[in-house]
Amino acid sequence: MSPDGRWLDPGPYLRGVAWRDGSGRVLRADPADTMRLPWDTGERATLPIGVRLEFTAQAPAHAVEIHYRATVPGPTDALRDLSHGFALWNREGLLTEVFTEPAHESVVRIGLPAGPGPYTVHPPEGQSPLVLGLRGIGGALAPAPAAPRWVVHGDSITEGWWSTRPAHGWPAVAGRALGWDTVNLGYAGAARGELAVAEQLAALPAEALTLAFGTNCWTRVPHTAPLLYETTRAFLELVRQGHPRTPLLLLSPVLRPDAERTPNRLGATLGALRDAMERAVGDRIAAGDDRLALLPGRDLLGPEHLADGLHPNDAGHALLAMSVVTALRRAGFTGG
């Protein structure tokens, strides 16, 4: 047990945190600025996507206990069948998973191997767990060293849809490869270049930024190519007002076979929308933004990497993550 057996404040151990409300709940949008956000963005921002615990352990610690509250799905809830698992990772990979039944309040114990770590625990995301405390069993825990803060904004692909575990979404995979603290601001169904989101990103501390939106500008809220060109320019301008020299990578939409050559209600194909986004980035780079880089998304994935014709499977998420890591390194944004 921890030296005094008491629960530790989870705050210093939490990673991937953008904002917290007065109760300590992690949010992925500014709680003081929710009225300007679309409803779907605000709804997805309540889910703790990418939030995790990172710590080191002193010998002879042999387990960690996590005290948490979670939402218990009802009998007709679409999330009822999602696994309720806590995954323990170190720098080499997955160590173990502990699966429990959702409970309004519970404690989960996860065994630790010998060695100080650092260790990462990825909680389940679907039931929105709120970590109340943690403690080491047999030895003390300490927060893992701080890492560069990487803020990633995008849609359901960034949120990690169709990855089989929270740790398998492309931002999580890329963050591990880079050794960065990934803050996942992916909003399923949204991320259409909302300028209020750009202003929130501008105010959020970050050592690096990645933007990966555009797919939902094809049909969910249809755009024309000129509209998306100007939206991308405006979005980048607002982000740059808060981060004038922060390394920024824009990933244009990845392959979506049903949309590439199919016009939306305003006559724009996804291919045309992608071209517009890429031109907006290229024009800004040409105008002197040498801390901005573009990763064209069209050819990064093939149909075999898509689980449902839109969202990557685990292999697709891993491939996308390594493409982002390579692009960041080639742009000189990683220091290595």
Image: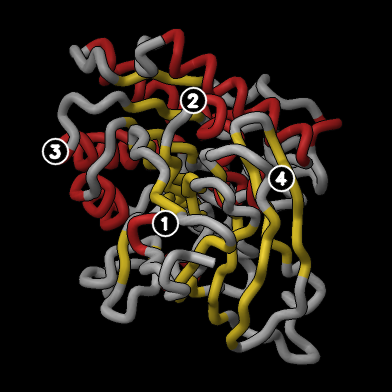
For label 2, the SS is helix
Judge the density around disc 3: few (<14), some (14-19), many (≥20) Cα neighbours within 10 Å.
Answer: some
For label 1, the SS is strand
- At a point 44% along the width and 18% down the height, the residue shown is 328
> What separation in Å lies between label 3 and label 2 (alpha carbons)?
26 Å
Judge the density around disc 1: few (<14), some (14-19), many (≥20) Cα neighbours within 10 Å.
Answer: some
- Which image quadrant is residue 111 in? bottom right
Image marks 2 and 1: residues in contact by CB distance under 8 Å? no
> What separation in Å lies between label 4 and label 3 (alpha carbons)?
32 Å
61 shown above or below 173: below
Q: Can you identify the residue that label 1 sits on?
A: 14
Q: Can you identify the residue that label 2 sits on?
A: 178
Asked whether residue 268 appears in the rendered view, the answer is no
* Amino acid tagged 3: Gln
Upstream in the sequence, badge 1 or badge 3? 1
Q: Can you identify the residue that label 4 sits on?
A: 311
> What separation in Å lies between label 1 and label 3 (alpha carbons)?
28 Å
Number of the front mark, 3 or 2: 2
- At a point 51% along the width and 47% down the height, the residue shown is 57
